[in-house]
Image (cartoon, rainbow, N blue to C red):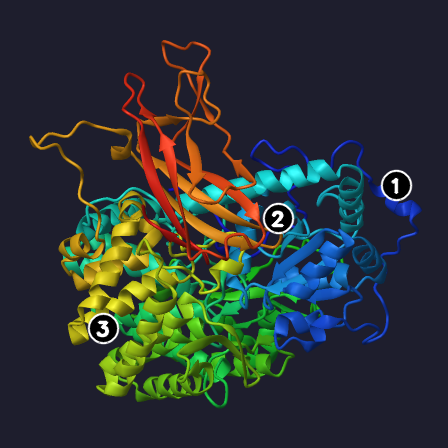
Amino acid sequence: MMRLRTGTDQHRSTAGGIGIVATLAITTLIWGSPILADDVARSGLRTDRASGLYASTNRLIDSHNPYLLVHAHNPVDWYPWGPEAFAKAKKENKPIFLSIGYSTCYWCHVAERTIYSNPDIAKLMNQWFVNVKVDREQRPDVDRIYMIARELMTGGGGWPNNLFLTPDLKPFYAGSYFPPRDDPRAGPGFPTVLASIDHAWTTDHTQALNVADNVMAAMRRVQSAAAGGAVAPIKPDAWLAKARDTLLPQFDQMDGGLADRRSATKFPNPPRLALLLPDYRINQTSAALSGVLNTLDAMVFGGIHDQLGGGFHRYSTEPSWSIPHFEKMLYDNAQLLQLYAEAFRITGLPLYRQIALETAGYLGRDMMAPDGGLYTARDAQLNGVEGEGYLWTRGEIVSLLGEKEATRFLSVYSLTSLPRPDVPDVVHPRDVNGEPPAVLRLRVPIDQTLKTTDFKEVTEMLASFAADRQKLLVAREQRAQPARDEKVVISLNGLTIAALAESSQVLHDPQLLDWAQKTAQRIWALAYDQRTGLLKHEIYRGQVQTSGFLQDYASLGAAFMSLADVTGEAIWRDRARLLANSILDRFVRADGAFSTTSDEKDLLIPIADDGDAETPSGTSIAIDLLLRLHEASADRHFLEAVARAVTRLSGQFQDHPELWAASVATLNRHRLPLASVGATATNSPPTPSATDGTHVPVTADHVGAAASAISVPDEDEVLVTIKVDDKFHINANPASFDFLIPTTVEFNDIKPKKVEYPKPTRFTPEFARDGLDVYEGSVAVVARFPKGSLSANSSIQGAVTAQACTNQICLPPSTLPISAAVGGRAKEP
């Protein structure tokens, strides 16, 4: 399975990481002689920021979205994602500048301040491009598609994610934060990039389109690989053991946490930590429990933990957890609440109960809407300075606690200074003594701190400073506060409802259950349409919007099951069943896999889950929901749906179970006989055999094919995915010699205007020293049809002809039937 390192692994990209060079044999986008700083200077460009509060207003003013509204008064002529922008780009033959971010993204704020508020830069953007803004949390499907493109073209991820697209939405250039002017450290300034892209588009238009086509072909291959994979035996216990053995060596033995060899950052990684707790319960693997507890301890003691207000920041920018990236995300805190509560249930250690209650208290106090529902995030920056709302100097602490008490306080807590900001116009404030602002954390090693301060237990030590922490918190809350993203995202609220409900039982705190029920009732009342069975994705200022995604339906359904388990009230299980039935009706593909969106046909490429990242994927949560409903009701169609999905993903679970941590944990908690169910649920055709009981091997034994039909702005397409077993290959099209059988794709009763075969791999056997062109692994063939030509059919039938060979033999060729349901759902042959 090909898995991209997406931006979910790093929210903040390096400034200027603009991805000038694209991979996949795509050369630099800026061909020939680029237009650089001198050309921009001659244009008379200014870089001073526009004066006036609201000198401009653009189309984002009508958006019910906090991130988009931040940009509503930019001089940039922003469009929201949608047909109006796409039609304008086509009519004027202009590239689209697509900028994807979210409201608590630090570098997104820097870009808004330094680039999009500059009227001279905006003038260039408006003149040459159609400019589109997207909130990744509102449109995770769009974000996922263009993060794949970014990864392919630059090798890195993160936000903001900025791309230039053709009018038919194909990406041909990608980057992140562009500085406002050329900078030797950060790379070309945004005006230089804009001028260079415009020059390339107008003077070498064909090459730009070729780059876009190459990127699209690569994106299809990536998505095909993510959605496919060989079928493997269904062995959840073996997957759990392999995941454990993969993760344990990754733990940092000194500072805790799963180390990232590519950078110094450390993320909490709740799904992976949560995977190791079932392993401990089932297999009593002490190393698994130790790895989790050491990480939970290190985070509690570190600066990633808000020592005054409770809750956790997004991630640590260095290995010791001392200096966080300061945004606070609902999804992190919901999952960490559940982890600390579970750690308390397993160990009985009071520290874990205290931290779980503090985290729940933070959610209820700072993230809960008055009428129910939890907000999405708290910003990292204040007045352009990251962390400014959370930082302290010793002088400030002394002024509040007095010299003697401050000295005692700082014998337990320490201040870790931040590095200098790498944004030119940002300087951290200093107090009168010139002290740099710093992050508050506990002193480690904690055993040494206990010894020097004469405390026996951490909880005893923390209790003795509760009054001091409260004084500091009161003073901190009198400062200006970082902005809060007040979207109520259904999938994230589902995670939090479940965490609050289940933790209320472990921690014996009914307040948590009250919060969970209040939130669940409000979401059900506002976001779910009982007449149509449709669920919305988000609520903002009382308005529901955006069609729900798989993750929304599954997460809310699983949360209702948790409420049913804790309260014993059947109404929650009934509501979970409604959501589960909607999943089966709207999100299950013909091959048994789950689609992430019910509007897949409207996307550039179909998007399937490829694992669990910062949260469990929609697929993993759906598996959990359906298994829980089956256990509660013995309803076999829920179990059969899980069996089909797990069978479809079994090769991925076998190869990289740690990437599917939530699914593997769920399958080991339930331990149901999926293999026997899957054999009947998949309805696979029997393997052909001769009358004497023998079978002559043919190509069809080692090659499979599937197809899906999609509609794109200018044409209809059928994507044919061919999967070739390991150690086999099939001949490319065209074949290297006339006597070889090329791989061909044909359709019944309809002829495509063009069939695009992928770039071949070179194979050099002994009998052909010059090499042969072949296809190996998973390959994608794209058949293009005139716009609307597929709509007259409910499905498109066709066939793939291929011949499979190894380095020694060739098998008889096979004709593999394919069927594509019009509307984007693939059918297994």
Kind of element beneath mark 3: helix
Q: Quadrant of the C terminus?
A: top left
Looking at the picture, tell me which residue is in the foreground, 408 or 340.
Answer: 340
Query: Which of pointers 2 and 1 lies earlier in the amino acid sequence?
Result: 1
Q: Residue beneath label 1, please?
A: 38
User: Which is more N-terminal, label 2 or label 3?
Assistant: 2
Q: Amino acid at mark 3?
A: Leu
Task: Classify residue 550 as left or right of residue 140.
Answer: left
Q: Are marks 3 and 2 in contact (CB under 8 Å)?
A: no
Amino acid type at circle 2 is: Lys
Mark 2: few/some/many CA within 10 Å (<14, 14-19, 20+)? many
- Looking at the image, which residue is at 32% across and 18% down? 807
Label 1 vs 3, first from the N-terminus: 1
Measured as percent of width and height from the top left, residue 118 is found at: 81, 61
Mark 2 and mark 1 in contact? Answer it, CB < 8 Å: no
Q: What residue is shown at x 80% (from left), y 53% (from top)? A: 128
Q: Position of residue 682 (x, y in %)?
A: 23, 53
- Please state the horizontal and vertical placement of residue 21, each as a whole percent of the image: 64, 37
Say which residue label 2 marks: 170
Element type where label 2 sits in the image: loop
Q: Which residue is mark 3?
A: 629
Give left or right: position of 112 versus 353: right
